[in-house]
DNA sequence: TATGAATGAGTATTCATTCAT
DNA sequence: GATGAATGAATACTCATTCAT
């Protein structure tokens, strides 16, 4: 097996176990047993347990950045109206988290309250989306689409909290009871809740 | 010193340390050193480290329940209009979390991703507020104040996520950079974002 | 309550608990709870946990000595024949241990393998009975009742081991399955096993 | 060093220390210091301290079983008379315990009065020999060699108690004062004490 | 004398990490 | 590179004993 494959194998096991049991409840022993490798091998790919976690989180963060870029690239900004852009952001975010229950769990629960660098990596997710939304909203204000008196920072926070909380509740590993949401429909419903309070023009449900 | 006082002393030290360093980074040694008691003493009041955490969380949850009851008792429901009621909920929640940075940190970050009973206690906060909001929204629909087509469960989730995220960002121990918000003003701003998408009648900013 | 009574109360609880759970599995907490006294009180009557055990064992040993004396006093040595004397020793021993399951357990199991003074106190039981039997056998040899070539020390050991083992198996707290023996009948059976190998004259079953 | 050797090393240290100081007076620290290994190493071979003890006892019990089998295999049952068979049992038992002072101490003293599984393992020794003797005696009765009216269970108990007590007194680590017995001579003496009370035919000293 | 809260030395056990093979 | 036996610092928890009230 090639080194890069083995590294992925380890990360896959770590992801599964961190997600299910949390960082401290997951032992190196568990990971190597699940990955089917020897105790020493994991230290050939990672400096220590924390490094496994951070690597995992950073890879996910990269995917996330990529997904966000796609979100922007996806749209023809000239023809798209502001609400549609907003709609798209929401959809992309939900879609991203819905793809991997385990990573969703790690980024949205397990990673919170961890010490040192691990916390920082995880915090970046939230900070990144907040910064993004702040940019969106400021642009909207400049273009006259968004209410001038909107508290941009607070609103970005509200939106982020709302989106991540929703993602966790409906797409995480723990989301046993709640049935996975239909992303298109949910996007529309979230837009329906937020758009009227944010945008200047009366909000029009999609397709009308 | 009376037993009850000493117990409070221990909980105070634990709260401070759990909040700053997290559950696993906080050693029993740290707590007893901070509380100025002997190693054995803490085990006269608590079965084990987990029990310290759970007791802390449960006391906080009781305050929280009490605060919620007050929120309702506060208002003269006959004269109050639906949006004002909503406004009040938000204000109360923000006010509650703003009162204790440490507990805010514990309930909103440190406690997440913990194993066993500790997780359940912490989850209750979120579940409780979601259930409350679901009740509010359903009532609003029955009374004709809230949009009939609103996805009640989703919206309650959005609101809860938004509120708790905001509380954490502006009132927690980690909220170093962000200056503490003025609660009245913030309440108004949050209401301004959510009300138009939730209520039937056009939203009227307070005092107009 | 008078001091002496309270001391007995404590010893009674200790006896019960040591017998059931062993020395190390019995905590001071268990004893005081069972005795219904405060933690500090036990230290007004005993120097420490070991002292409780030793006191218990020594009281029992005194009873034991007393019982042995009675055994001798009981008999009219002039008219009694040697085998009857032997018979009497056995009966007395069995009777003594059959009277208190808990003490039987402590002297015959719990006390063995304990460190320091506790072991010595317990060992005395065995040593005492061995010395006694050695005396008996030597006297028997001098009087021509016992085989001259008998290894006295070894035989005393065999007899003691046999008697104490039997006492434990049939009278201790753990002797759940075995039904308590009828002492007269058992004495006769034991005599029937040992007497022929020890005494010079052919052994005569009692009553013949 | 091979794993199996190291395990034996640990067991050797544990045996020595348990035998001298008892189970509770022996610390894990003592064992690892004596074995010259690191603290964690012992837990690679044993689940916990109790497991060390139980493993020790069980290995000893296996040797014991093996020794018993040999005892039977040793004899040409056709030519051997019943008393010789009995003689052989006694000799084998004494021989077995005389071989290892430490194990003798553990099985006959230290192990008694221990809690849980440890007690059960130790109890097996006694139970096994009792069952064996019961079998022997019953067979003897069927063949007409042993007294029909003998209380088989009681006699097996007497014999076991006598043998184990003798083994402990003369071969254990604590048997400082008593000089180790010559097994052949002792076997003959024990036979001389028991045989006349058990067998039908007049007992003949060996070699006459 | 009785109490019971406080004490802290003592101890088993865990688990990430290392390193010789 | 891979292995897995060995390591030992770290840590929670116990429980006999003390002593101020």
Image (cartoon, coloured by chain):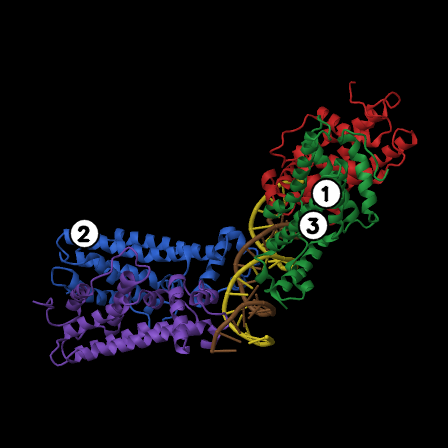
Chain colours: A purple, B blue, C red, D green, E yellow, F brown
For residue D183, side relative to residue D128 (left or right): right
| Residue picked out by circle 3 | D106
Using the image as rendered, state which of residue D38 and residue B36 is in the foreground: D38
**Residue B156 figure quarter:** bottom left
| SS category of the residue bearing label 3 | helix
Distance (Cα) linking label 3 and label 2:
75 Å
The alpha-carbon separation of the residues under discs 1 and 2 comes to 96 Å
Left or right of A191: which side holds D185? right
10 Å crowding of disc 2: few (<14), some (14-19), many (20+)? some
Check chain identity for marks 1 and 3: say if they share one. Answer: yes
Q: D119 above or below B117?
A: above
Looking at the image, tell me whether mark 1 or mark 3 is earlier in sequence order.
1
Subunit bearing disc 2: B
Quarter of the picture containing the C terminus of chain B is bottom left
Chain that bears disc 1: D
Question: Where is residue B202 drawn, in percent x and y?
Answer: 11, 63
The residue that appears at 78% across and 22% down in the rendered structure is C205
In the figure, D204 relative to D24: above or below? above
- Which residue corresponds to mark 1? D76
């Amino acid at each position: 097996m090639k080194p890069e494959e083995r590294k992925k194998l380890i990360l896959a096991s770590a992801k599964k176990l961190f997600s299910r049991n949390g960082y401290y409840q997951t032992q190196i022993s568990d990971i190597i047993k699940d990955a089917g490798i020897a105790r020493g091998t994991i230290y050939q790919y990672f400096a220590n347990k924390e490094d496994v976690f951070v690597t995992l989180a950073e890879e996910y963060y990269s995917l996330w950045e990529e997904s966000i870029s796609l979100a922007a690239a996806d749209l023809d900004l000239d023809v798209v109206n502001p609400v549609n852009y907003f709609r798209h952001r929401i959809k992309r975010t939900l879609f991203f988290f819905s793809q991997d229950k385990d990573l969703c769990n790690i980024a949205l629960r397990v990673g919170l309250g961890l010490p040192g660098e691990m916390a920082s990596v995880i915090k970046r997710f939230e900070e990144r989306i907040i910064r993004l939304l702040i940019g969106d909203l400021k642009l909207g204000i400049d273009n006259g689409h968004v209410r001038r008196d909107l508290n941009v920072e607070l609103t970005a926070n509200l939106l982020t909290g709302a989106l991540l909380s929703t993602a966790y509740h409906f797409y995480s590993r723990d989301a046993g009871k709640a049935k996975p949401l239909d992303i298109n429909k949910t996007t529309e419903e979230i837009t329906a809740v937020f758009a009227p309070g944010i945008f200047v023009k009366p909000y029009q449900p999609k397709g009308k």
